[in-house]
Image (tube, rainbow, N blue to C red):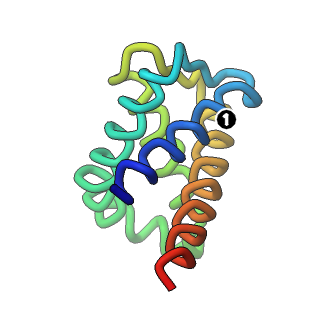
Amino acid sequence: MKLLFRWVLNALAILAIARFVDGVELSGFYAALITIVILGLINALIRPVILILTLPVNLLTLGLFTFVINAIMFWFAGTVVNGFSAAWFWPAFIGAVLMTIASWIISALLANDQK
């Protein structure tokens, strides 16, 4: 039940991001739900491989290259999901940063709920 609640909250967060960030477009709540699932799969399956392959660059930039990887994963989700798109790098970058912050807040709120 908690996973479903987290899924819906993240979908609402990505809807808000699409509303306020120019260049990030989302067709509706259903597309937001699918986008969150695809983003979760991308972050679980593809992102770790990319992080390992780009480890030298990530070390040289003191971890800041991770933001670029997050933006690329966000943009990639936009190419896979119908109804969701990020126009170019900077909207994807801003959207990924905001989505990371929103997910962190949602996780923190739900973790405090367990106590």
Quadrant of residue 34 within the rendered picture: top left
Q: Position of residue 70 (x, y in %)?
A: 49, 50
- 15 lies left or right of 56: right
Q: Residue at x 56, y 25 (%)?
A: 86
Q: Which residue is mark 1?
A: 17
- For disc 1, the neighbor class at 10 Å (few under 14, some 14 to 19, many from 20) is many
Q: Quadrant of the N terminus?
A: bottom left
Q: Position of residue 64 (x, y in %)?
A: 60, 65
Q: Position of residue 55 (x, y in %)?
A: 38, 69
Q: In the figure, 46 relative to 23: above or below?
A: below
- Going by the numbered disc 1, the residue's amino acid type is Ile
Q: Residue at x 42, y 42 (%)?
A: 73
Q: In the figure, 92 relative to 25: above or below?
A: below
- Most foreground residue, 10 or 100: 10
- 49 lies left or right of 15: left
Dot 1 lies on which element?
helix
Q: In the figure, 5 relative to 113: above or below?
A: above
Q: Residue at x 39, y 22 (%)?
A: 79
Q: In the figure, 45 relative to 94: above or below?
A: below
